[in-house]
């Protein structure tokens, strides 16, 4: 276990991963571990982790996966099973390194899929619930179409310059994600098998106007999971409800976290 400063770098495997820790350390209190989207980073969560920490009383740990933010770049092209690698190899080592003892995984998009693979594939008793924002369990036509559109935008508009604010090597971040999803072989990517092995409560938050996935993802979770699945459809939100409907998203996550982690004084919610 490494000593955690409010910000720093963890050496996990062959990579240096930037992180930010808000509130109590994982060894001292329940912790929400946040897993960002396919073009995200620790910083791109904005102040949402701080608001979560204030509203739940939990510690909140955010980090940038390799290839994102200020973390080490990755070799391109990425392996098409990169989310499995993150869930089954990197995340277990990271949780051990930070002294994680009890809490929730909270993932967005790719991060939600990684959280699902971990929860179903590792059976870690320390993880007591999983929050998935806009998760993917299979590849849908709408996902591929929107990812192809964003590739065109990256190469023809100011999107690249906007993303440079969040990534040290923006091409590494973008193409590592985009090229994997657009590879024809990726259409066979399917993580439904992991859902049946999740043994903790799950909360799914989906924007009503999500252009990267449909309600089919939620139907799959309900079909495959034996654990409780709490679903919230966020009106007026797209693929990033924590940005587009931040207040309602925060409220839903806090309610879930408090219900799952009740009994631990450090996890009891305070009025936001």
Image (cartoon, helix red, strand yellow):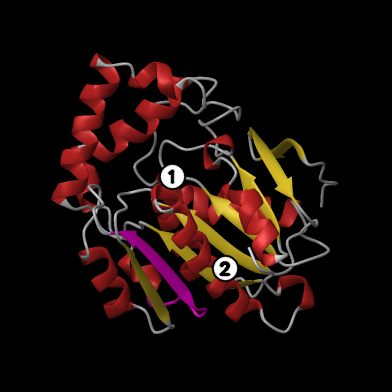
Magenta stretch: includes residue 51: no
Q: Residue 206 magenta-drawn?
A: yes
Which part of the image, by quadrant, shows the C terminus?
Answer: bottom right
What residue did someone put label 2 on?
254
| One can see residue 65 in this view | yes
- Depth check: give the residue in front, 165 or 228: 165
Choose between 209 and 104: the one closer to the eye: 209
Q: Is residue 158 left or right of residue 248?
A: left
> So how many labels did they put on this image?
2
Q: Considering depth in this image, is 247 or 226 the residue closer to the camera?
A: 247
Q: CA distance from mark 1 to mark 2?
A: 20 Å
For mark 1, what is the residue? 37
Local secondary structure at mark 2:
helix
Asked whether residue 117 appears in the rendered view, the answer is no
Above or below, 125 against 40 in this view is below
At 34% across and 22% down in the image, what residue appears? 159
| Quadrant hosting residue 71 | top right
Residue at x 38%, y 28% (from the top left corner): 174
Q: Which mark is residue 163?
A: none
Q: Position of residue 194 (x, y in %)?
A: 39, 69
Which residue is at the front of the view, 28 or 193? Answer: 28
User: Do labels 1 and 2 touch, CB within 8 Å?
Assistant: no
Q: Earlier in the sequence, mark 1 or mark 2?
A: 1
User: Is 92 located above or below residue 154 in the figure?
Assistant: below
In the image, which residues are magenta? 196-207
Q: Position of residue 193 (x, y in %)?
A: 34, 70
Counting other residues with Cα less than 10 Å from the Cα at mark 1, is it few (<14), some (14-19), or many (20 or more)? many
Image location of residue 120, percent across then percent down: 47, 70
Q: Looking at the picture, does residue 161 appear above or below residue 27?
A: above
């Amino acid at each position: 276990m490494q000593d955690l400063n409010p910000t720093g770098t963890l050496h996990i495997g062959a990579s240096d991963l930037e992180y930010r820790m808000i509130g109590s350390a994982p060894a001292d209190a329940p912790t929400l571990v946040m897993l960002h989207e396919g073009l995200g980073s620790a910083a791109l969560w904005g102040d949402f982790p701080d608001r979560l920490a204030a509203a739940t009383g939990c510690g909140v740990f955010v980090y940038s996966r390799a290839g994102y933010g200020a973390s080490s770049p990755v070799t391109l092209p990425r392996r098409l099973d990169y989310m499995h690698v993150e869930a089954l190899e990197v995340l277990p080592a990271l949780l051990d390194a930070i002294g994680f003892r009890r809490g929730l995984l909270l993932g967005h998009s790719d991060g939600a899929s990684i959280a699902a693979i971990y929860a179903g594939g590792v059976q870690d008793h320390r993880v007591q619930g999983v929050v998935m924002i806009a998760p993917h369990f299979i590849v849908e036509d709408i996902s591929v179409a929107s990812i192809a559109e964003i590739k065109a935008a990256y190469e023809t508009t100011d999107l690249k310059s906007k993303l440079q604010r969040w990534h040290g090597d923006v091409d590494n971040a973008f193409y590592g994600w985009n090229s994997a999803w657009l590879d024809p072989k990726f259409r066979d990517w399917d993580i439904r098998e992991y859902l049946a092995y999740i043994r903790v409560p799950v909360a799914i938050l989906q924007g009503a106007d999500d252009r990267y996935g449909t309600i089919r993802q939620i139907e799959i979770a309900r079909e495959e999971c034996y654990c409780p699945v709490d679903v919230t459809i966020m009106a007026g939100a797209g693929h990033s409800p924590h940005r587009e409907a931040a207040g309602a998203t925060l409220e839903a996550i806090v309610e879930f976290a408090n219900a799952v982690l009740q009994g631990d004084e450090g996890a009891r919610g305070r009025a936001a």
